Image: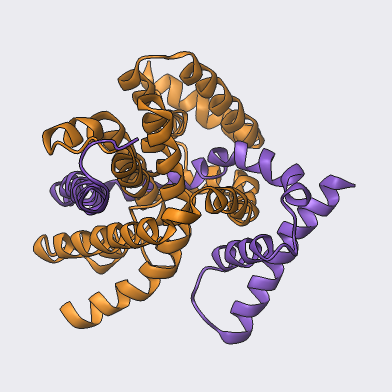
Chain colours: A purple, B orange
Amino acid sequence: MKYVLSSAIILLCLAAAKFIMHSIGGSFPAPLLAMVILLLLLLTGIVKEHQLKPCASPILNIMPIFFIPAGVGFIEHLGLIKSHWPFLVAIILLVPISTLLLVSSVIAYFKGRVNND
Amino acid sequence: MTEQLKSLTAQLTPDLWWLSVPVIIALFLLLRLLNQRVKHVILKSLTNPVFLSIAIIALLLVNLNLPYTKFASHSQLLSWLLEPAIVALALPLYQQFVHVRKNLLLIVTTCSLGIINATVVAFLLSMIFAVPTQLSASVAALSVTTPITLIVTESLGGIDSLAAALVIFIGLLGALFGFILFKLIKIYNHEAQGVAMGTACHAIGTAAALVEHPKIGAFSSVAMALSALLTAVIVPFLYPILVNTLL
């Protein structure tokens, strides 16, 4: 029963988000809207953590499997990758380096550069 | 030899496509077991099970001339399950919210800055290298965990699979060199290191952060969960603004 309730909560949030996005004709991804709806339900106490856990925990545990087929899809674009590899290398290096520098510096500015435990 | 192998697989594969899902699951679980046994931090990042699963399957499909479209259609069950799994991400997000309430404003602000920075840097590089629009849309949402990247990139009209591969590479590089970078810029604060790793290098960076120190890992997972939410809100609004004002 607990599995039925847990999966029903997840699927109802997904269905509600899809219905909302379909009704307003927006382009925001429905599963993400559903995630926000479920988060709000948890924060307001309408849905309890223990009601969601039975189905959510195992699905999160094996979640990486679900994006393997999509990840393999890059082989469909090998030509594009070959012709734009300098751009892709620049992206792989500069996006994380700049983000790491910016975020760590801003927090260090407010909290100090060394650990203050 | 290779030709013989290719003709053999061409004969066998029409009957064996149903194996796609069990093979993916078995390969992933096997590689995850291998990854759990590795203790060395660099080797742990390099044996990331998602990275290796994608690499091994991609190599098999390319070298054995197997069509990706067939593979994709037979493994669609897994792609369908991605949607409810994304909804279930609300659970870790909620659990992290409860633990970091007193620092929430600072962490939300810095995560947002990190996401805006990643999108703007990727967009500027797209302009400098003059890449096609589809490619620039593919790199707009890279500062976030893979499932969110897939869905946001698709909504922007980019190539979701390419974005997923880039996200994994970014995570690996962050896990390998993130803490060297912090030493170079002399930032040793656990909160700063953790939030930066979670925002820039998502799950793979968080795994490396947990190895470094539990507190860094905790802040990293908070930042990763928040970035998932914030990317979904920020990037679909920021990217069209960048396109309309800078192009």
Where is residue B211? Give x, y as percent: 39, 25
Of B204 and B220, which appears nearest the observer?
Answer: B220
**Quadrant of the snapshot with the C terminus of chain B:** bottom left
Image vertical order of residue B64 relative to residue B224, above or below: above
**Identity of the residue furthest to the right in this view:** A1
Of B213 and A34, which appears nearest the observer?
Answer: B213
* Residue located at (64% from left, 79% from top): A20
**Identity of the residue furthest to the left in this view:** B128
* Residue located at (55% from left, 84% from top): A25
Q: Quadrant of residue B221?
A: top left
**Can residue B156 be spotted in the picture?**
yes
Image vertical order of residue B117 relative to residue A74, above or below: below
Where is residue A71? Give x, y as percent: 44, 44
**What is the number of callouts on the image?**
0
**Quadrant of the snapshot with the N terminus of chain B:** top left
* Residue located at (45% from left, 21% from top): B5
Where is residue A96? Give x, y as percent: 24, 46
Residue A7 is left or right of residue A102, and the answer is right
**Can residue B59 be spotted in the picture?**
no
* Residue located at (33% from left, 53% from top): B142
Image vertical order of residue B191 relative to residue A32, above or below: above
**Identity of the residue furthest to the bottom in this view:** A24
Residue B28 is left or right of residue A42, and the answer is left
Where is residue A94? Give x, y as percent: 17, 49
Of B229 and B216, which appears nearest the observer?
Answer: B216
